[in-house]
Amino acid sequence: MLNRATERFERRLIEEISGLRTEFHCTLQEGLTDVRKEIVTTKSDLLKWSFLFWIGQVAAVGALLSYMLRASGR
């Protein structure tokens, strides 16, 4: 009787552990998918703002050089 109870307990324990493993795997995959989406969004935003920064810097340097060339031409 004790062996039967032990076998039932072990079988039930194995079923529960496999269920938890499956649930953990699915939850982990969903979480990783969300992280990947956030990384892609952040990467594209960073690229966009980097280009805007560099365009602004080129415009500022161009304006400064233009002013300096006009000032030195007197």
Image (cartoon, grey):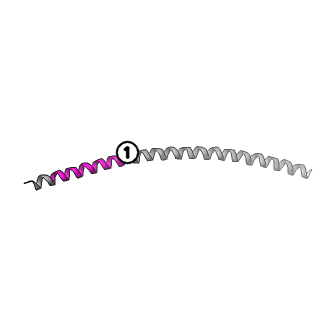
Mark 1 is surrounded, within 10 Å at the Cα level, by few (under 14), some (14 to 19) or many (20 or more) other residues, namely few
Which span is picked out in magenta? 47-67
Q: Position of residue 44 (x, y in %)?
A: 42, 44
Residue pointed to by mark 1: 48
**Residue drawn where x is 32% and y is 46% of the image:** 52
**Residue drawn where x is 59% and y is 43% of the image:** 30
**Residue drawn where x is 78% and y is 48% of the image:** 14
Please identify the residue farthest to the right as the structure is shown: 1
In the picture, measured across the screen, residue 71 lies left or right of residue 59, that is: left
Q: Nearer the viewer, residue 62 or 52?
A: 62
**Residue drawn where x is 56% and y is 44% of the image:** 33
In the picture, measured across the screen, residue 16 lies left or right of residue 50, that is: right
Q: Amino acid at mark 1?
A: Lys
Residue 26: name its quadrant.
Answer: top right
In the picture, measured across the screen, residue 17 lies left or right of residue 68, that is: right
Which secondary structure type mostly characterizes the magenta part of the structure? helix
Quarter containing the C terminus: bottom left
In the picture, measured across the screen, residue 23 lies left or right of residue 51, that is: right
- Label 1 sits on a secondary structure element that is helix
Q: Position of residue 12 (x, y in %)?
A: 80, 47
Q: Nearer the viewer, residue 28 or 73?
A: 73
Please identify the residue farthest to the left as the structure is shown: 74
Q: Position of residue 17 (x, y in %)?
A: 74, 49
Q: Nearer the viewer, residue 5 or 51?
A: 51
Q: Is residue 55 magenta?
A: yes
Q: Position of residue 45 (x, y in %)?
A: 41, 45
Total residue callouts:
1
